Image (cartoon, grey):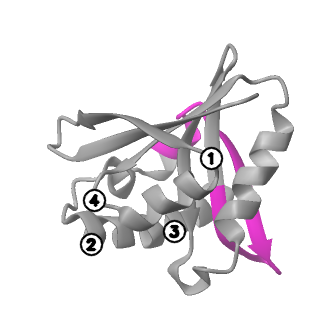
Amino acid sequence: ETAVKVLHLQRRAYTIEAQIIGSTALPPLHDTIASLQRCGERFFGYFQGERLVGAIACKRNGKTLRLCRLMVDPDCFRQGIASALLDFVIKQEPSISEIVVTTGSGNAPAIRFYERHGFRAIERIETPERIELTKLVKRSG
């Protein structure tokens, strides 16, 4: 039941990113309930009542935390949900030395969001789907 809610939210949120960057080849748009359940990421949700309106997923490797997904229902944009989720995950991992995230290079709102939270762009990457991503890092200390 939770995976169904996450998948629904993910499709709504990543459809907006796909429109912004001009590509429907974004891997999150092709996830299934089974692929979400076996992805190995830790998920945290943001609820308004019973409705899942935001989620963040991450993986830790040593002192590095990789943000794998950060999504907010388009009906709930600009309400501080993404910031609350990011702050929550950072507080869960006080011993990390860096946080890494990638987002579509053409997704200016996402890049501005991460930069406001102390991330700096360090690299551009092209995926097999021919999507250009920007890798951003936030280091502690």
| Residue receiving disc 2 | 19
Mark whose residue sits in front, 1 or 2? 1
To which residue does mark 3 refer?
8
Mark 1, residue position = 118
Callout 3: helix, strand or loop? helix
Q: Is residue 46 magenta?
A: yes
Q: Residue at x 60, y 58 (%)?
A: 116
Q: Is residue 17 visible?
A: yes
Part of the protein shown in magenta = 35-55
Q: Is residue 137 above or below residue 106?
A: above
Give the residue number, with chain letter if any, for mark 4. Answer: 106
Q: Are marks 4 and 3 in contact (CB under 8 Å)?
A: no
**In the image, residue 115 lies at what x, y percent?**
54, 52
Kind of residue indicated by mark 3 = His
Callout 4: SS: loop
Q: Position of residue 50 (x, y in %)?
A: 79, 77
Q: Earlier in the sequence, mark 2 or mark 3?
A: 3
Q: What residue is shown at x 50% (from left), y 51% (from top)? A: 33
Return the residue nearer the eye: 14 or 106: 106
